[in-house]
Amino acid sequence: MRDLSRDLVPIYLQLITIFRRFIMSGQWPLNEQIPTLEELSAQFGVARATVRQAIGFLEREGLLARYRRHGTFVIARPQRDSWYTIPTDWAGALKAHDGLEPEWLESRRASPLPKAFHPGTELGSAYQLIRRRYRHDGVPFLLESAYLDVALYRTLGAERIRQTPILRLLDTTPKLKIARAELSIHVGTSDSETSTELAIPLNAPIAVVRQSVCGDGKAVIFQSEGFYRGDVVRVIERMKVGV
Amino acid sequence: MRRPDPLFEMSDATPIYVQLIMLFRQQIGTGKWEVGERIPVLAELSRKFGVARATVRQALGFLEREGLIARSRGRGTFVLRKPAGELWFDVPNSWQELVDQSDEIEADWIDIDAPIRVPDPSEVSRAVLAPHYFVARRVLRRDGVPYLIGTSFIDQRVVDRVGSERLPGPSFYRVLEQARLKVARADQSVHIGTADAEIAYYLQVPLNAPIAVVRRWALDARATLVYQSEGLFRGDFVQIRRRLK
């Protein structure tokens, strides 16, 4: 086991983070007894009083309960029941905004132009920037900046863009050719603007999701960058197997 | 009176020196602090961000241990290289890519000092547990930088077919292939978490730094759960890229 004393954070605080993971992951199963103070003290090489301090904290949090002579038990497992799944295929991406509550922040000519999000794609000369915030179960969880080719923006019209997700508009526009569409997801931390808009602490983990759609050739007709609260999003995929 | 940079508000949720580490890594990563150049002096950084000098020193010490900067007495602090976090590790969605991708791995085995439970397979419907699992925990490195803590559970019968002495070498996916295991179904999930004290230590990241949690399950044709894994990646090291169309 690592030497916890080398870190600058108090040891009992470090133990809390580890024990909480054991409970969340089911390593310490619900309704079962956790290892004794002596065992944990030996495993982590720390004083029993320090282990007791960490356990006491999780007891007050309602995750553990100590019963005299019976030991300490896991009595609750914090569960997240409102996950939002980020789709990673085209059919899913078309429906990605269904059930979300959008809030219009601004719409203006993009200046300066953003960079192209994906290698091998190139930006045109003018884009409309549409910034929206989305809520999921009432909680703000996505801040999105969408860049739409200005000519397309005029063709589609502001009203339709308000009503219908842009990807779906592109997908259903007659004679509009889509040569390629890409998606990338990164893990990041929120800056002060994102923190304010999503009501999360500065440096909280976020998922950064970028999409780009090319018309004929390399030219980007649409690209978007979404900052999601990291603690509510996930990706689930059936993997390709066999040949 | 300190007048902190209005662009950089400190939050209460994360220790200030951790926020500084993230910010300084960003300065280096984006090239605002260029490789080979000297960074602003302690007093200046302390004034700019409205924090104590000792806190700035603590953050710089972390980056020095990470090998990004070097302090040279009398001459100042210099940027040595950009954070390795710019080298993305791709999470593929095909089993064969996993097998092919991970041949050149550097790994340290972690002693498992407490029994590890086989995770609940309920997330995969109708999966049947194998009688025994071989369990391994490893830290994987690239260019010497640890980027992943992987815990894998492999059906013991599969391991017996190739011999457990073969395991320390190649990736486990290659081992499964060598055991002529036919994977009939595989699923993966990715979510975002934060590094607890143990993870922070192994991945050499600050406490509460973002991590990506990648879980995989593989079933054979009889729906036996032959492989299960949980990978904890440095958040700044991993990406998912998909062609949508």
Image (cartoon, coloured by chain):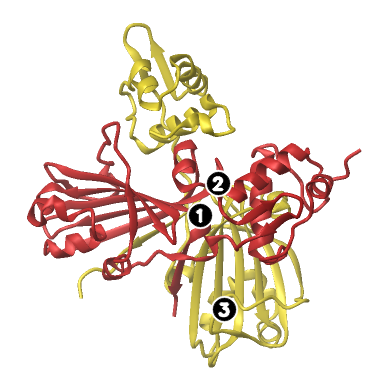
Chain colours: A yellow, B red
**Split into 4 quadrants, where in the image is the N terminus of chain A?**
top left
Q: Secondary structure at mark 1?
A: helix
Q: Residue furthest right?
A: B1
Q: Which mark is residue B235?
A: 1
User: Contact, CB < 8 Å: mark 2 with mark 1?
Assistant: yes
User: What residue is shown with label 3?
Assistant: A169
Q: Residues within 10 Å of mark 2 (few under 14, many from 20)?
A: many
Say what amino acid the circle numbered 3 marks.
Leu
Marking on residue B209: 2
Question: Which chain does the residue under circle 3 lie in?
Answer: A
Front residue of B7 and B85: B85
Q: Is residue A199 visible?
A: no
Q: Secondary structure at mark 3?
A: helix
Where the C terminus of chain A falls, by quadrant? bottom left
At a point 43% along the width and 30% down the height, the residue shown is A19
- With respect to residue A70, does B84 lie above or below? below
Disc number lying in front (2 or 3): 2
Give x and y (percent) for residue B100.
28, 70
Residue at left offset 58%, top offset 71%: A165
Between residues B178 and A210, which one lies in front from this camera angle? B178
In the displayed structure, B197 sits above or below A100; it is above
